[in-house]
Amino acid sequence: MRRGWGSRWQQTEQPPADDAGAWFAGRLPDEWFTEAPTVTVDREEILVVGTLPPLTGEFADEAERAAAESGRISRFREQTREERIEIARQAEHRYRRKVAWGARLGGTEELFTTLSVPVMTRLRQPERQVLDTLVAAGVARSRSEALAWAVRLVGQHADAWLTELRDAMSRVDDLRAQGPDLA
């Protein structure tokens, strides 16, 4: 988050969210999820996705099972709405980030209340032409949606490399923390 004073810009500090997974695991009702939820944190948002208890009963096919899973997730969303709002309010105060929720059941995962954050980009014409091609082909409705699609595609194909990069960045953060305090 940036705050402006005249022509000067200053980066405001966000509190660390390293303990967000543990905080949510301790704060959420035990009966909501079958295991600790997956908690993903970035600069703007904390995403909490939990696994719901499995369905019982037989289903004629996978389509019927998927419909039942989606229905159960929808029921969870409605039944927990007020409590999720209160927990999110507390977390937003603690971490100064918005909280988004999701649930998974079997092969179905649904996210709700997720944030769509605008991103400034300076793309040259060749990059804009790629986005325009995706729009013209009907893959995306806008350049913004095409850019999101391209980022997801790169993320899927570069997952191992991105994981290694994040681990390396984490090691650098650990080394910085071990260094002398210059304050």
Image (tube, helix red, strand yellow):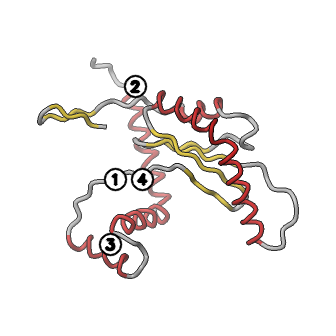
Marks 4 and 2 sit apart, C-alpha to C-alpha, by 35 Å
Residue 143, percent across and down? 33, 68
- Residue kind at label 2, given as amino acid type: Gln
- Which one is earlier in the sequence, the residue at label 2 or at label 1? 1
- Which one is earlier in the sequence, the residue at label 1 or at label 3? 1
Estimate how packed mark 1 is, as few (under 14), some (14 to 19) or many (20 or more) residues with alpha carbons within 10 Å.
few
SS type, badge 2: helix
- Residue kind at label 4, given as amino acid type: Ser
In the picture shown, does residue 154 fall above or below 11?
below
Q: Do labels 1 and 4 touch, CB within 8 Å?
A: yes
At horizontal 38% and vertical 69% (from top left) the residue drawn is: 146
Residue 181, percent across and down? 32, 19
- Residue kind at label 1, given as amino acid type: Pro
The residue sitting at the right extreme is 57
Q: Quadrant of residue 130?
A: bottom left
Residue 88, percent across and down? 54, 35
- Which one is earlier in the sequence, the residue at label 4 or at label 3? 4
Q: To which residue does mark 2 refer?
A: 178
- Which one is earlier in the sequence, the residue at label 2 or at label 3? 3
Q: Do labels 2 and 1 touch, CB within 8 Å?
A: no
Residue 85, percent across and down? 57, 37
| Pair 4/2: label in front | 4
- Camera-side residue: 42 or 96? 96
- Residue kind at label 3, given as amino acid type: Leu
Q: To which residue does mark 3 refer?
A: 131
- Which one is earlier in the sequence, the residue at label 4 or at label 2? 4
| Pair 2/3: label in front | 3
Q: To which residue does mark 4 refer?
A: 116
Q: To which residue does mark 1 refer?
A: 118
